[in-house]
Image (cartoon, rainbow, N blue to C red):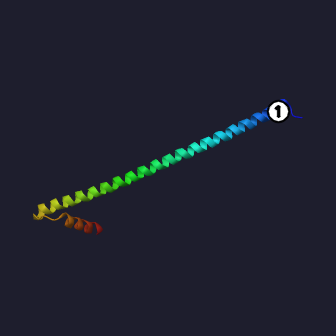
Amino acid sequence: MLTTAVKAARKAGGIIKTMRDGLTAEVDKERARVEAQIAQKVAEAEARIEQTKSRALASVNDIATETAGAIVKKLIDADVSKDELQKALVRRAAE
């Protein structure tokens, strides 16, 4: 026959296990929620970075075109269209 102290200890152990399991489940749920938020924010940041890179590369292309036009004007005193300059730059970049 179990003593009252042993019964109380077992009951307390059961209560503690139930509480621990409940807290573990809450922590896991919160961790999953926070990780999902972080993943979303990282994806949004990566998308913004990609957009910024695209705009920056477009700006570089525009600057290169303007610079090439100014150089051609200075060297041979000829006006070249933006389209012609861009085509020439693309051909040169492919080499």
Left or right, residue 32 beside residue 1 = left
In the image shown, does 61 or 83 lie closer to the viewer? Answer: 83
Left or right, residue 40 beside residue 62 = right
Mark 1: amino acid:
Val
At 63% across and 43% down in the image, what residue appears? 25
Q: Where is residue 40 in the image (x, y as percent from the top left)?
A: 47, 49
Q: Is residue 1 above or below residue 54?
A: above
* Crowd rating for badge 1 (residues with CA inside 10 Å; few <14, some 14–19, many 20+): few
> Residue furthest toward the right?
1
In the image shown, does 69 or 35 lie closer to the viewer? Answer: 35
User: Hey, which quadrant is residue 72 in on the image?
Assistant: bottom left
The quarter of the image holding the N terminus is top right
User: Hey, which quadrant is residue 59 in on the image?
Assistant: bottom left
Q: Where is residue 76 in the image (x, y as percent from the top left)?
A: 11, 65
At 12% across and 62% down in the image, what residue appears? 73
Q: In this view, does 47 lie above or below 18?
A: below
- Report the number of numbered marks: 1
Left or right, residue 59 beside residue 21 = left
At 19% across and 61% down in the image, what residue appears? 68
The quarter of the image holding the C terminus is bottom left
- What is the secondary structure assignment of the residue under circle 1? helix
Left or right, residue 52 beside residue 85 = right
Q: Position of residue 2 (x, y in %)?
A: 87, 34
- Determine which residue is flagged by label 1: 6
User: Hey, which quadrant is residue 92 in on the image?
Assistant: bottom left
> Residue furthest toward the left?
77
In the image shown, does 28 or 73 lie closer to the viewer? Answer: 28
